[in-house]
Image (cartoon, rainbow, N blue to C red):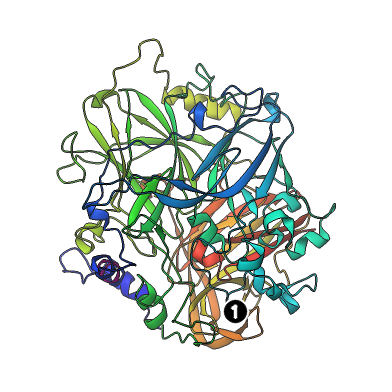
């Protein structure tokens, strides 16, 4: 199968001397952007860069508060929050009139809601915090429409029935028009009991009138009051919607925010024992990509003529029957890459900073986009692109998803997978008066593992704007009253003494799982999960099929994730954090298509995989831009490799594991993780 992916891979390997053809995505996207008419898209090149500031998600004004917090980590956290529609300014302007545009979004919040939602900052029980955070999540999305086009042909909340609906309810009787939008909040990185975990089959509609099938099996039945375990180490968690089959849309609409755990070492306060920069020198940013219409509305492709439709529908020879897709849509598309970069809800923002160390808590909250981060000094304080920018600055990565690293990693580029978080320290001390641009050298395309030369995205996308994320202007004077106390040697000493990094024991079982690329019943790309069998073949499953990943309680397992697809997938396990152990190349044979049973009884297909063998070890470390010496809950599984992780499964119940490309998990790249 000579797909767009293999085409891209060929390009990536073609070498820098060859003129590359224009990327098909961009051709479509720009043709569309230049069209006039009701659906015309915002042209990212016409939007301001580095003018507005984005809220710092760790600003005390941006923290959820209970009565005793005062902007400090909350000791006995108890919150009542809602998901609701609102209107926000993203920094978009009408390029002709200069008028600021407003964008309808969905947000989480208490009295007012926002995209991203405000930040939880809680104290670990080890440092005197309460054992649990209690959050009531009210669904107030009772509008008669989703903000974005919903493909009702896929395995989603209101298509469950028969074998796919374990409580016997036919959810096809429900609709967004009548019953509102189903949501379920997942605390990503949380060590939650399963009924509070945000499993997609625990969705609920406004007022809880429609409840996902798994609530019938929860210990105390349905509740919208969730309890989150704070007997964990300091880390960068985040919360986002996880409703079955529409996660990509609910998150795109704005349902995401940070949840930071602090402890006795990483207190978040000035004079913390690790010498880490604290607010206002600690900044938290969620990086996402979006498309907008010229009027400023969120745009998500789903119809003929939309960006990517040609690539993923016509280009894959998919055939969408007109009964289900009256005008060729709305259809789910295999991936999404936005042409506008948004940081904490603002397009291409800037932050004014002092010449000192800053700590950046970064989240890649994009649907499909792998970011490859670099920091470079711009040609001038007014520069809005990287022309004439300096060479990449070194920076430290001191932690990742669920905690601090075993030692700081000094690197100058960072592979940043969707769903992942990194904890970065960067020194602006010698850069007074300059603008530093956070650059992205990842492409607007599925990630195959190559980046930078010879696959220089700027060659392929001469005018793309997604090569820059935000700017730091070192224009503030040094606040003498607050010493700059970060010292990497001291941090490394503490990290060694205190045992930062991963803390997973020796595995007593090995599980071989697999990533596939198949096709659904309409011929659309359908990424799948499955297992590697003892006879060196592999079997793919859709999400409703009986669970195969069922570790025993308190067992530590090695997972060998075999990637038989052409792209990298960021693999996420709920409940646990894991240690990335290593990677090897794999070889395998692809045979004739095998049937894959879909949720509705129809048959999709996936190439038979056989003769799987493991080859040479692959070393991916800080030198290659990978930071994995910290507790992770998302791992980049590269194509043609087996990626090994180990984790301990210490709570019973029905969790999930999935690809964190949201368009993939919504289209079956998710399976139950059932601990018993
Ligand atoms: Cu994926």
Q: Nearer the viewer, residue 430 or 497?
A: 430
> Which residue is pictured at 16% across the width and 46% down the height?
387
Residue 512: image quadrant is bottom right
* Residue 345 horizontal/vertical position (percent): 42, 45
User: How many other residues sit within 10 Å of disc 1, few (<14), some (14-19) or many (≥20)?
Assistant: some
Image label count = 1
Q: Is residue 85 left or right of residue 376?
A: right
Residue 350: image quadrant is top left
Does any portion of residue 59 appear in the rendered image?
yes
* Residue 527 horizontal/vertical position (percent): 52, 72
- Residue identified by numbered label 1: 537
Residue 620 on the magenta segment: no
Q: Is residue 169 left or right of residue 520?
A: right
> Which residue is pictured at 62% across the width and 57% down the height?
142
The quarter in which the N terminus is drawn is bottom left
Image: 183 above or below 323: above
* Residue 603 horizontal/vertical position (percent): 60, 86
* Residue 449 horizontal/vertical position (percent): 38, 60
The quarter in which the C terminus is drawn is bottom right
- Does dot 1 land on a helix, a strand or a loop? loop
Q: Is residue 331 left or right of residue 41?
A: right
Outermost residue to the right: 220
Give the residues in magenta.
Answer: 26-30
Q: Is mark 1 within 8 Å of ligand 1?
A: no
Q: Nearer the viewer, residue 173 or 283?
A: 173
Does any portion of residue 188 appear in the rendered image?
no
Q: Nearer the viewer, residue 500 or 237?
A: 237
Q: Main secondary structure of the magenta part?
A: helix
Image: 225 above or below 243: above
């Amino acid at each position: 199968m000579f797909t767009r992916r293999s085409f891209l891979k060929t390009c990536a390997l073609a070498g820098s001397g060859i003129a590359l053809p224009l990327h098909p995505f961009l051709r479509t996207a720009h043709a569309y952007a230049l069209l006039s008419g009701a659906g015309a898209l915002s042209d990212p090149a016409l939007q301001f860069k580095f003018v507005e500031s984005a809220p710092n998600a760790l600003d005390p004004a941006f923290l959820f508060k209970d009565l005793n917090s005062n902007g400090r980590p909350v000791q006995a956290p108890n919150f009542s929050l809602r998901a609701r529609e609102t209107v926000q300014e993203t920094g978009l302007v009408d390029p002709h009139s200069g008028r600021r545009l407003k964008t309808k979004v969905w947000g989480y919040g208490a009295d007012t809601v926002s995209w991203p939602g405000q930040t939880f900052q809680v104290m670990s029980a080890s440092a005197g915090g309460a054992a649990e955070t209690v959050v009531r999540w009210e669904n107030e999305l009772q509008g008669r429409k989703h903000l974005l086009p919903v493909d009702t042909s896929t395995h989603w909340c209101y298509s469950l029935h028969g074998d796919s609906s374990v409580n016997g309810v036919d959810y096809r009787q429900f609709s967004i028009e009548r019953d509102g939008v189903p949501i379920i909040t997942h605390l990503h990185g949380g060590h939650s009991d399963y009924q509070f975990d945000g499993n997609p089959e625990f969705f609920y509609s406004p007022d809880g009138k429609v409840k996902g099938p798994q609530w019938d099996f929860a210990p105390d039945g349905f509740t919208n009051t969730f309890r989150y375990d704070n007997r964990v180490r300091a880390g960068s968690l985040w919360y986002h919607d996880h409703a079955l089959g529409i996660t990509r849309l609910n998150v795109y609409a704005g349902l995401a925010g940070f949840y930071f755990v602090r402890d006795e070492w990483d207190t978040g306060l000035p004079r913390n024992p690790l010498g880490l920069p604290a607010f206002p020198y600690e900044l938290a940013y969620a990086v996402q990509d979006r498309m907008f219409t010229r009027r400023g509305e969120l745009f998500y492709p789903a119809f003929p003529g939309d960006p990517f439709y040609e690539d993923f529908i016509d280009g894959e020879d998919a055939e969408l029957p007109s009964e289900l897709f009256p005008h060729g849509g709305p259809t789910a598309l295999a991936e999404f890459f936005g042409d506008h970069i948004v940081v904490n809800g603002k397009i291409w923002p800037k932050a004014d900073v002092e010449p000192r160390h800053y700590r950046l808590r970064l989240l890649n909250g994009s649907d499909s986009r792998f970011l490859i981060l670099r920091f470079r000094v711009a040609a001038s304080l007014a520069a809005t692109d990287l022309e004439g920018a300096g060479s990449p600055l070194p920076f430290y990565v001191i932690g990742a998803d669920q905690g601090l690293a075993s030692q700081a990693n000094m690197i100058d580029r960072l592979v940043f997978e969707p769903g992942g978080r990194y904890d970065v320290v960067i020194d602006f001390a010698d850069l007074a008066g300059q603008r530093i641009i956070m650059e992205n050298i990842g492409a607007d395309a599925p990630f195959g593992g190559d980046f930078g030369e010879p696959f220089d995205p700027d060659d392929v996308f001469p005018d793309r704007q997604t090569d820059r994320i935000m700017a730091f202007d070192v224009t503030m004077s040094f606040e003498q009253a607050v010493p700059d106390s970060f010292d990497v040697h001291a941090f490394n000493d503490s990290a060694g003494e205190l045992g930062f990094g991963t803390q997973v024991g020796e595995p007593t079982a090995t599980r071989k799982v697999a990533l596939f690329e198949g096709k659904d019943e309409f011929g659309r790309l359908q990424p799948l999960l499955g297992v590697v069998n003892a006879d060196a073949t592999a079997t793919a499953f859709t999400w409703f099929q009986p669970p195969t990943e069922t570790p025993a309680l308190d067992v530590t397992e090695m997972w060998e994730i075999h990637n038989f697809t052409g792209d990298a997938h960021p693999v996420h396990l709920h409940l646990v954090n894991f240690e990335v152990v290593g990677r090897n190349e794999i070889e395998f044979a692809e045979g004739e298509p095998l049937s894959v049973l879909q949720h509705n009884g129809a048959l999709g297909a996936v190439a038979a995989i056989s003769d799987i063998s493991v080859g040479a070890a692959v070393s991916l470390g800080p030198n290659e831009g990978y930071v994995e010496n910290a507790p992770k809950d998302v791992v980049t599984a590269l194509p043609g490799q087996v990626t090994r992780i180990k984790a301990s499964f210490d709570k019973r119940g029905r969790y999930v594991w999935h690809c964190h490309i949201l368009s993939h998990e919504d289209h079956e790249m998710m399976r139950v993780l059932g601990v018993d």
